[in-house]
Image (cartoon, rainbow, N blue to C red):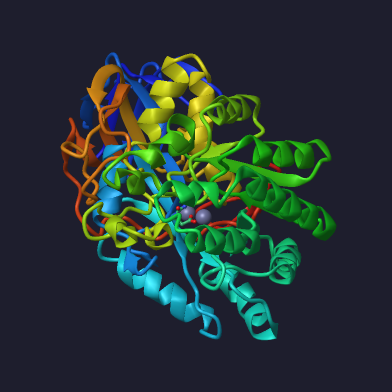
């Protein structure tokens, strides 16, 4: 059925204006001031007083991921439902690989966990843990058949996911040839391993030592190293979850030299700080991420980097664990606390409330950061990430004046706590459409599990069109 959204204010990464949106067959069919005739037989949605944003694109999630001796709590069902409530309509999840295993096996595992469950559209990044002739042979198929055009290399988590510099460099070289974007978790895993063993041997086992053994210098060093290797390979790099000034400086310096280096931060680094890890009764474990939360002054550095464009995107790094039964695996040994938290639902609202409402970024920058730029960098644009004729009707009707308190009592994520518990935010998604269908209507879930589709993405620097990709300098 056709739908028409009337009386709302459309906001894209470049424009803010009042117009109606006509939706046909899941796409935006027309945008204009007088669409009365075009929409005669259409269901009318009144968006008076609300903004209409393109659905959020979350470039960084770990749903149902085996990690830290357990499995992240939110799966593709609860995780995508929560994402939708929060105004996100597309996510890109990290597909883990095992050394020696065909890449296709790992990708099939990720398809199996998502296919029947997702309520919003999704895609995958692929982890590269080793590079050899066997792996190199498989990469063209990963890109051309699976539409996976981003590879992830971990520079930390020694003896688990960590890859060496040769692997990173060869991945960068291959990505340059194949048209993929290389993503890095940038921390110096070798030195962290040394500092961690030292802390434990000295009896320092509390959650705060997670932060103290991963100092910001080690994030800055790894970020600079990855950027240098990117320049040498004349390739392209996306640094995930940037948490501190040291890493921002390295990204800014690489960009000032003309390198293709991009950076993402996450809501937790914008509003929480290292002191949370010192909370009593082991509550500090709720705030264990890698990289760790930093000293508070870094928050303003990150906001300024978003504003100035040195960082371009906001990922949730959704990787949730219950406090009871999962985070508490690390009682008496901080290295056993599973790293990560439930963020997917609050990513957009925190950026709007702390960013736009507090005057740190403009409304159009907000849309760029929470949706458009990720869509462009990861080969989803203009199908996703904007409101334009022909784009998927992934839309968020957003009340900018609603006030509410973030809490585990009201969130839709499966985890038993919310790291932003008690935080007041301004602004709330009221209704969310995915390809023209309501997933959330007037704050009620109306979607169906399995309605989310897997999206094959275009190569780096290309646009995603229904009938194939074409070259563009849009990134
Ligand atoms: O602590 C984090 N960030 N957990 C998720 C895995 C990762 O490193 O992104
Ligand atoms: Zn990471
Ligand atoms: Zn992550």
Residue closer to the observer: 215 or 232: 215
Q: In which quarter of the image is residue 128?
A: bottom right
Viewer-nearest residue: 474 or 343: 343
Which residue appears at 46% of the width and 66% of the height? 95
Residue 4, given in percent of the width and then of the height, sits at 28, 29
Q: In which quarter of the image is the C terminus?
A: top right
- Image vertical order of residue 148 relative to residue 33, above or below: below
Number of numbered markers: 0
Q: Where is residue 20 in the image (x, y as percent from the top left)?
A: 35, 22
Vertical position of residue 381 compared to residue 181: above or below = above
Q: Is residue 55 visible?
A: no
Question: Residue drawn 54% across and 38% down?
Answer: 313
Residue 58 in sight from this viewpoint: yes
Residue in view at x 44 percent, y 49 percent: 289
Q: In which image quadrant can residue 455 be found?
A: bottom left
Q: Could you tell me residue 367's position as x and y percent?
A: 48, 29
- Does 53 sit above or below residue 164? above
Direction from residue 244 to residue 275 in the image, left or right: left
Q: On the rendered image, what quadrant is the N terminus found in?
A: top left
Q: Position of residue 327 (x, y in %)?
A: 30, 56
Q: From the viewer's side, name the closer residue of 412 and 117.
A: 412
Q: Is residue 186 above or below residue 309?
A: below
């Amino acid at each position: 059925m056709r739908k028409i959204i009337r009386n709302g204010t459309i906001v894209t990464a470049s424009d803010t204006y009042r117009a109606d949106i006509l939706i046909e067959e899941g796409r935006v069919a027309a945008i204009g001031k007088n669409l009365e005739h075009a929409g005669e037989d259409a269901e009318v949605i009144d968006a008076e007083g609300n903004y209409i944003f393109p659905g959020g694109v979350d470039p960084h999630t770990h749903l149902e991921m085996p990690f830290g001796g357990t499995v992240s709590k939110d799966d593709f069902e609860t995780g995508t439902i929560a994402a939708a409530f929060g105004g996100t309509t597309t996510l890109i999840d990290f597909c883990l690989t095992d050394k020696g295993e065909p890449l296709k096996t790992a990708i099939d595992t990720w398809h199996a966990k998502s296919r029947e469950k997702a309520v919003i559209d999704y895609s995958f990044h692929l982890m590269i843990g080793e590079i050899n002739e066997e792996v190199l042979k498989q990469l063209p198929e990963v890109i051309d058949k699976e539409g996976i055009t981003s590879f992830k290399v971990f520079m930390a988590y020694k003896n688990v996911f960590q890859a060496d510099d040769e692997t990173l460099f060869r991945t960068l070289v291959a990505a340059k040839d194949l048209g993929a974007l290389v993503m890095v978790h940038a921390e110096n895993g070798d030195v962290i391993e040394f500092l961690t063993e030292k802390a434990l041997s000295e009896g320092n086992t509390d959650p705060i030592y997670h932060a103290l053994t991963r100092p910001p210098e080690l994030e800055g060093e790894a970020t600079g190293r990855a950027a240098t290797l990117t320049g040498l390979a004349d390739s392209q790099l996306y640094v995930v979850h940037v948490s501190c000034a040291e890493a921002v400086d390295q990204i800014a310096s690489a960009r000032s030299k003309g390198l293709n280096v991009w950076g993402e931060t996450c809501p937790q680094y914008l509003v929480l700080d290292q002191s949370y890890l010192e909370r009593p009764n082991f509550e500090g474990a709720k705030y264990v991420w890698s990289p760790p939360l930093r000293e508070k002054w870094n928050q303003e550095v990150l906001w300024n980097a978003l504003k100035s464009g040195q960082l371009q995107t906001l990922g949730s790094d959704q990787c949730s664990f219950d406090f009871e039964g999962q985070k508490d695996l690390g009682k008496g040994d901080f290295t056993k606390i599973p790293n990560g938290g439930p963020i997917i639902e609050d990513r957009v609202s925190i950026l709007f409330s702390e960013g736009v409402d507090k005057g740190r970024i403009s409304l159009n920058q907000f849309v760029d950061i929470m949706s458009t730029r990720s869509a462009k960098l990861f080969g989803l644009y203009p199908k996703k990430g904007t409101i334009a004729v022909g784009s998927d009707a992934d839309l968020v009707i957003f009340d900018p004046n609603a006030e509410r308190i973030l809490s585990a009592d009201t969130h839709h994520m499966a985890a038993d706590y919310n790291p932003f518990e008690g935080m007041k935010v301004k602004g709330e998604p009221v209704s969310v459409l995915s390809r023209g269908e309501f997933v959330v209507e007037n704050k009620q879930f109306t979607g169906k599990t399995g309605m989310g589709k897997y999206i094959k993405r275009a190569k780096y620097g290309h646009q995603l069109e229904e009938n194939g990709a074409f070259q563009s300098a849009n990134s």
